[in-house]
Image (tube, rainbow, N blue to C red):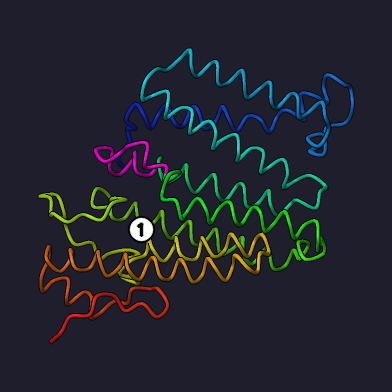
């Protein structure tokens, strides 16, 4: 079995993510200092919030001391995502009506960090700060902020709507399955995978049809599609659920068609044969239509 050797940026991201994630131990430290029974609910107290803020400041100073330039930028983003994941865990296990938002925080932060880490493993030559996908697009940012606003507004106006654990659990399963499918697709494609649609064929490009690609032509898009919808099911956001479904479907329809034009040019009849045998995996998206 081959040993994966991460590039410097990948190693730095792992260390920084773990440093941010260690915020989960703040309630334990507070309980030891205060001589009280440990509980995740300690995160809700003023003392815990101050301790979290102090911890984040100390970690950022440490990263600034250890790294400089572009590597520091990687460390800062990875630490922020690890910190968000840790806070999401604390909220998830606390006795609070915001539990499902904690699930969402874990889902969102892990998705963005794993995009960077897997890229560092399979295709380090294409690795950039953009590999975190934190600045994916203005539309993506607006969609994310809108979902937070809807959840918060409905939490105060219709709090019982946000306590449908069965529905949120279905959303969490969608998120986990979508995440696993996307990362499986990235790992299977290896160096052929790129976050940017390639318009020129590199010498290393090969047509990948094995693994999850034998089930779907675009498994990474299928995973992302259901992951994005699942996040809104987790939050029980009816408005954003509809908006995410429509917006994601339109985005991936255009993305698939654009990518398949390039793939047909790259691989010709081999891809056309593959296209006839394997569906895209996305609902009502057949892909680029080739006139006979």
Furthest residue toward bottom: 292
Q: Main secondary structure of the magenta part?
A: helix
Q: Is residue 198 left or right of residue 156?
A: left
Q: Nearer the viewer, residue 1 or 115?
A: 115
122 magenta-colored: yes
Q: Vertically, is 15 above or below 169?
A: above
From the top left corner, tell me how far across and down residue 140 is, in percent: 47, 54
Q: Is residue 54 left or right of residue 206?
A: right
Q: Which residues are magenta?
A: 117-132
Q: Is residue 237 left or right of residue 214?
A: right
- Residue in the picture at 10% in, 70% down: 268
From the top left corner, tell me how far across and down residue 90 is, in percent: 72, 40
233 magenta-colored: no
Q: Quadrant of residue 3?
A: top left
* Disc 1 crowd, CA 10 A, few/some/many (<14, 14-19, 20+): many
Q: Vertically, is 147 above or below 261?
A: above
- Residue in the picture at 63% in, 29% down: 22
Q: Vertically, is 285 above or below 124?
A: below
Furthest residue toward top: 65
Q: Quadrant of residue 215?
A: bottom left
In the rendered image, which quarter contains the C terminus? bottom left
Kindly identify which residue carries mark 1.
185
In the rendered image, which quarter contains the N terminus? top left
- Residue in the picture at 27% in, 64% down: 210
Secondary structure, mark 1, is helix
From the top left corner, tell me how far across and down residue 265 is, in percent: 11, 66
């Amino acid at each position: 079995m081959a040993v994966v050797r991460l590039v410097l940026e990948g190693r730095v991201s792992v260390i920084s993510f773990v440093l941010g994630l260690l915020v989960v131990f703040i309630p334990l430290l507070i309980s030891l200092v205060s001589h009280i029974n440990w509980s995740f609910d300690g995160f809700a107290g003023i003392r815990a919030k101050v301790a979290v803020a102090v911890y984040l400041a100390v970690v950022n100073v440490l990263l600034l001391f250890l790294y400089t330039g572009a590597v520091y930028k990687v460390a800062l983003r990875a630490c922020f995502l690890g910190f968000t994941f840790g806070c999401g865990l604390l909220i998830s296990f606390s006795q609070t009506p915001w539990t499902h938002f904690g699930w969402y925080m874990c889902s969102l932060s892990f998705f963005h960090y794993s995009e960077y880490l897997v890229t560092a493993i399979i295709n380090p030559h294409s690795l950039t700060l953009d590999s975190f996908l934190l600045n994916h697009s203005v539309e993506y940012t607006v969609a994310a902020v809108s979902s937070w606003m809807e959840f918060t507004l409905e939490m105060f106006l219709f709090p019982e709507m946000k306590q449908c654990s069965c529905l949120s659990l279905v959303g969490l399963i969608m998120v986990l399955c979508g995440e696993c499918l996307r990362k499986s697709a990235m790992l299977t494609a290896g160096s052929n995978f790129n976050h940017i649609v390639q318009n020129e064929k590199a010498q290393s490009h090969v047509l990948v049809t094995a693994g999850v690609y034998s089930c779907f032509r675009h498994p990474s898009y299928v995973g992302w599609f259901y992951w994005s919808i699942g996040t809104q099911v987790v939050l029980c956001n009816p408005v954003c659920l509809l908006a995410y479904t429509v917006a994601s479907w339109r985005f991936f329809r255009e993305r698939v068609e654009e990518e398949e034009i390039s793939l047909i040019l790259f691989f010709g009849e081999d891809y056309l044969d593959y296209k006839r045998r394997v569906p895209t995996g996305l609902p009502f998206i057949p892909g680029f239509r080739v006139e006979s």
